[in-house]
Image (tube, helix red, strand yellow):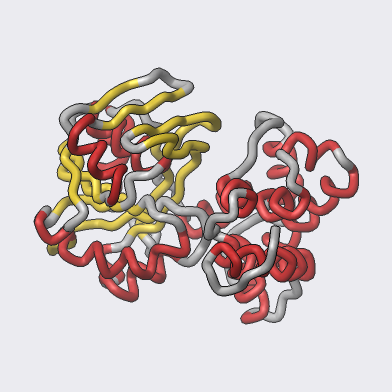
Amino acid sequence: MRIAVYGAGGVGGYFGGRLALAGEEVLFIARGAHLQALQTQGLQVESLKGNFTVSPVQATDDPAQAGTVDVVLVGVKAWQVPEAAQGIRPLVGPNTCVVPLQNGLEAPAQLAAVLGDQHVLGGSCAISSAVTAPGCVRHVGLEPSMTFGELDHRPSPRAERLRQACEHAGVTAVVPPDIHAAIWEKFLAIRFGPIGAVARAPIGVLRRVPETRRMIEQALRETVAVARARGVGLNEDAPHKMMAVLDTVPPELIPSLQRDIMAGRPSELDALTGALVRLGQEVGVETPLHAFMYQSLLPLELRARGQLQFPS
């Protein structure tokens, strides 16, 4: 398969690297010093599942030079998806499928609005990884996996072909019967992110302190209430099951939203917190905890984006 990875950061770098190592034709769309390092030194991945290097690497900052591909894996941050959709246009041919891997709920619709419904799959991934230096990615937690499927739930050869390529590359890949429910389930799994950003504490502390544990439980209940009101097939016991999963997560884990906010970088606050408030309002479901977290963290987000100034 010819695969373009649009956004070669911690997510795109890891999954694209695994696919390239397995022999797939992978083109990385990157920029700046990271792009230069990929072009001159290759991609170095430090991983809990074994370190590896991909060299040489196909990489460019100009998708128009790349031509069309079979698959585009979108690895940018959720807030970058609308702009990325425009940049992806030259990569899309008649049979291309575009798979968003970011956190959040709105990426498939944002991509489809620009590229057309027929080219977009629903998707998500699980991994804790980051760029540590130009050309270098470190995988520090979670079992890497990708989930994707047609937005109308039909089985498709292109989704199965990508699944098989992932499996050949040693990456767990799942094509669920209901990709919308799967995306919301992933969304459930990262509900502790904004809580950690407010509390400045890792998941192990959040789940151990009774007050913050109750916040996680409330965030899960609010999310399921919105999903069910929007016709998404999540079970009412999903919060209880997800809490049991979160109790097994390594206690030192700090999600990307929290890391970005603590570092003063633009984050996925709107996509991971503000979006649930908006989606709840559309169906008349109150989300008071998410509204509180969004409003509390918004000044930091605006400062990170240069829209507000105040001392640390």
Q: List x then y, in percent, for residue 282.
A: 62, 81
Q: Nearer the viewer, residue 276 or 137?
A: 137
Q: Nearer the viewer, residue 308 or 70?
A: 308
Q: Nearer the viewer, residue 134 or 75?
A: 134
In this view, the residue farthest toward the front is 311
x 62%, y 57%: residue: 234
The part of the image, by quadrant, that contains residue 207 is top right
Q: Quick check: can you spot residue 157? A: no
x 19%, y 38%: residue: 39
Say whether residue 256 is left or right of residue 277. left
Q: List x then y, in percent, for residue 212.
A: 83, 48
In this view, the residue farthest toward the top is 50
Say whether residue 249 is left or right of residue 118. right
Tell me: residue 231, above or below residue 282.
above
Say whether residue 64 is left or right of residue 243. left
Tell me: residue 27, above or below residue 304.
above
Q: Quick check: can you spot residue 301? A: yes
Say whether residue 42 is left or right of residue 282. left
Which corner quadrant holds the N terminus? top left
The part of the image, by quadrant, that contains residue 131 is top left
x 30%, y 44%: residue: 33
Q: List x then y, in percent, for residue 120.
A: 31, 62
Q: List x then y, in percent, for residue 306.
A: 53, 69
Q: Nearer the viewer, residue 126 or 261?
A: 261
x 44%, y 35%: residue: 132
In this view, the residue farthest toward the right is 210
Which corner quadrant holds the C terminus? bottom right
Tell me: residue 48, above or below residue 285.
above
Number of numbered discs overlaid on the protein picture: 0
